[in-house]
Image (spheres, rainbow, N blue to C red):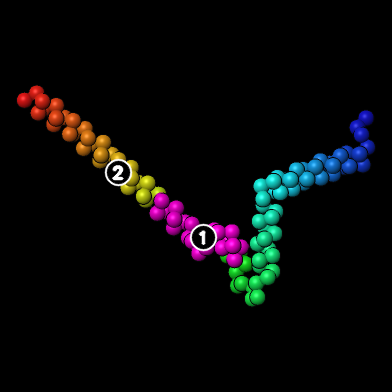
């Protein structure tokens, strides 16, 4: 017969608790807890609450604010395309140069 439901519920709590503890240790080991604590203390100690708390936190952590990610992605895609075009031109011109050098060597 299957174990009583209370036992399995207790086991799942233990599993959830151990997962939480493991995650907490991960956050602590990587300095995330101390960094977040510093950010929140900094926010708390601000004489005037910032209009946008998320931007304040990003700025505090050194992340750029007011950046249009989609615009940057589009620009990046365009630059990659231009780079590929230029690489193809270089390959074509290098090939032409080798052909001309070979013709000159023959003649």
Do the numbered discs 2 and 1 sit on residues whose CB atoms are within 8 Å? no
Q: Secondary structure at mark 2?
A: helix
Q: Say which residue label 2 marks.
A: 85
Quadrant for the N terminus, please.
top right
Which residue is the extreme one toward the bottom? 48
Is 59 in the magenta?
yes
- SS category of the residue bearing label 1: loop
Mark 1 is surrounded, within 10 Å at the Cα level, by few (under 14), some (14 to 19) or many (20 or more) other residues, namely few
Residue at image location 91% in from the left, 39% down from the top? 7
Q: Position of residue 71 (x, y in %)?
A: 44, 58
Residue sitting nearer the eye, 102 or 82: 102
80 on left or right of 89: right
Spatial CA distance of label 2 from label 1 is 31 Å
Name the residue: 74% across, 48% down.
Answer: 24
The residue segment tinted magenta is 56-76
Question: In x, y percent, where is residue 5?
Answer: 91, 40
């Amino acid at each position: 017969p299957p174990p009583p439901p209370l036992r399995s519920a207790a086991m799942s709590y233990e599993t959830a608790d151990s997962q939480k503890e493991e995650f907490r240790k991960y956050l602590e080991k990587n300095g995330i807890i101390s960094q977040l604590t510093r950010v929140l203390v900094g926010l708390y100690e601000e004489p005037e609450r910032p209009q946008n708390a998320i931007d304040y936190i990003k700025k505090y952590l050194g992340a750029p604010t007011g950046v249009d990610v989609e615009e940057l992605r589009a620009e990046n895609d365009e630059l990659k395309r231009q780079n590929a075009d230029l690489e193809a031109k270089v390959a074509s011109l290098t090939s032409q140069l080798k052909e001309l050098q070979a013709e000159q060597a023959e003649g």
